Amino acid sequence: TPVTPDTPFVIGSISKSFTALAVMQLVEVGDVTLNTELSHYLDEFTGKPAGAITIRQLLSHTSGYSTGQGNAGHPDATGEKDELARAVEQLADVTPAYELEEKWEYSNANYEILGRVIEVISGQEYQAYVTTNILDPIGMEHSFVADGEIHEAMATGHVPWFGTKLPVSENGTDRATAPQGGVIASASDMARYLQMMMNGEDDVLSADGKAQMMRSASDVSPHHGFGWNVEPDAGVVW
């Protein structure tokens, strides 16, 4: 099948900006507060080492979770609808590698947990929330969120193999990792998304909310906002 501007591709960690946008939507309606501790939203973190992490620290990768902790994976992934909930329950038992705000370190764990916060606060699966509140309003008709199913419309991925590339046999998707890497989007739809983020208008999020996402989150996170890398001196976000 030829690739077109409407072919859906796994966009990987660009998905984190969608999760951050969803969290900011919940902030703007008053359901989530950036400086509130994680244990307030997720009972499984009550009394746990990570329970004092705030939503802001998760968004900006200053929670103390390390890159390695975020890449540890979940051996009992089954594709069932509670997979994200079970994965985050496992993370609740992990002691972050660093103290709060000790350093900036990119970690998938932060966004996996935020995905679960979205589910608990909204009462919807992560996939349904993002589809209803982000993809549909923007008109991203050739995009979707990883749901554990095989999607024939997706571009076929390839893996390195002794100097060549082999196609991945199935276009499977993983529910547990959806908040940090499981948005599947076409080039044309990503253009719509970027237009929305840069238009300076109130739409799926307020103009002020978008601007906040694309500013340095804290002194410990000078080059990262909420789901976006920032270069303040150059006036660039990516």
Image (tube, helix red, strand yellow):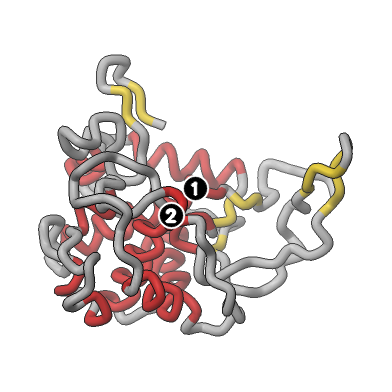
Residue 170 has which mark? none
Within-10-Å neighbours for mark 2: few <14, some 14–19, many 20+: many
Question: Residue at (35%, 23%) from the top-left corner?
Answer: 236
Local SS, label 2: helix
> Picture coordinates of residue 200 (x, y %)?
26, 35
Q: Is residue 209 above or below residue 72?
A: above
Query: Which is nearer the eye, 110 or 9?
Result: 110
Q: Give the mark nearest the N terminus, 1 or 2.
A: 1
Distance between the alpha carbons at the discs numbered 1 and 2: 9 Å
Q: Nearer the viewer, residue 16 or 92?
A: 92
The tag on residue 108 is: 2
* Residue beneath the point at 86% across and 48% down: 166
Tell me what residue is drawn at x 50 percent, y 56 percent: 71
Q: Is residue 18 left or right of residue 177?
A: left
Q: Residue at x 44, y 56 (%)?
A: 70
Tell me: 161 left or right of 45: right
203 in relation to 95, above or below: above
Q: Amino acid at mark 1?
A: Ser
Q: Mark 1 sits on what residue?
A: 13
165 w.r.t. 109: above or below: above
Whether tag 1 and tag 2 are in contact, CB under 8 A, the answer is yes
Question: How many marks on residues?
Answer: 2
User: Looking at the rendering, in which quadrant would you find the C terminus?
Assistant: top left
Choose mark 1 or mark 2, whichever is in front: 2
- From the top left corner, tell me how far across and down residue 102 is, in percent: 20, 43
Q: Position of residue 206 (x, y in %)?
A: 21, 48
Q: Amino acid at mark 2?
A: Asn
Q: Mark 1 Cα within 10 Å, few/some/many (few <14, many 20+)? A: some
